[in-house]
Image (cartoon, rainbow, N blue to C red):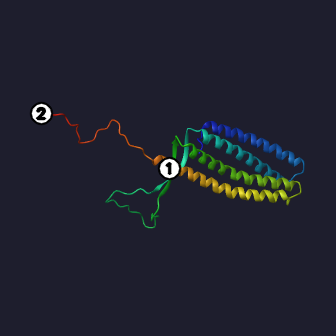
Amino acid sequence: MISFSWMHLLVLLAAGLVLALVVFFIIRRWRRAGIDLDIAATLTAATLFAAISLLGAGLTLVELLTAAQLQMTVPVRQFWPQLPDGMTLTTAAGMPARIDGGFTSADLAVENVSEGARALWAIGQTLGVLVPAAIAVLIAIACFQLIRGRAFAPVVARMALVTAFVVLIGGVLAQALSEFAGSLVSNQLLSLNGVSIAGRRRSGIRPRSSRRRR
């Protein structure tokens, strides 16, 4: 995940204003040319969405590869808060009650992530952004061919096949790579080489004093 700041918000607002102006002038030009407004608006929206997705994918990849800290979802052993011994929880009749299960993942901010885990996480997150872009590209091509009067052109069928593979393989890889990277980071976080306690004495134990022999 990418950290968000006011600078990002200003950039998004500026980009949104520019895109709105571009869409306005494009639709106005196509309206004068006699093109159906519904098709023109769909083509413009799909093209802009694909462009924004590609830009976002590039920014996501760069950010995740260079950031000092990463916001990651890592798997953990199933856990659910337990009440102390001798304490029972009484719920009202008809209210939901837990039978089994618990938390199996945790959202963490981590640093010093290994290069392999960082690369897998970055690629997985980037693929997740690129999958919607492939669908937007297919819609834009279909609308463009519809404007040209070739709604069933061979390029539409080929792009539909390519998009299906991209969505299927890209979606699976995005999930698999992200989960594998989270597993690597989880193992690295829980692999302890030792424990040290600074500035703390053991309670009830005093250092032995040397006794002189008589």
In depth, the one of 173 and 74 nearer the eye is: 173
Q: Is residue 101 left or right of residue 18?
A: left
The residue at 50%/49% (across/down) is 186
In depth, the one of 16 and 50 nearer the eye is: 50
Disc ID at residue 109:
none
Q: Is residue 43 left or right of residue 88?
A: right
Give the CA distance from mark 1 to mark 2.
Answer: 56 Å
When the figure is inspected, residue 55 is found, relative to residue 134, above or below; the finding is above
User: Can you give x and y, in whole percent of width and height, for residue 36 in the image?
Assistant: 86, 54
Q: Is residue 148 left or right of residue 18?
A: right
**Residue topped by disc 2:** 213
Mark 1: secondary structure: helix
Mark 2: secondary structure: loop
Label located before the other in sequence (1 or 2): 1
Q: Residues within 10 Å of mark 2 (few under 14, many from 20)?
A: few
Q: Nearer the viewer, mark 1 or mark 2?
A: 2
User: Can you give x and y, in whole percent of width and height, for residue 82 in the image?
Assistant: 39, 57
Q: Residues within 10 Å of mark 1 (few under 14, many from 20)?
A: some
The residue at 57%/45% (across/down) is 116
In depth, the one of 55 and 200 nearer the eye is: 200
Task: Give residue 100's quadrant in the image.
Answer: bottom left
Disc ID at residue 186:
1
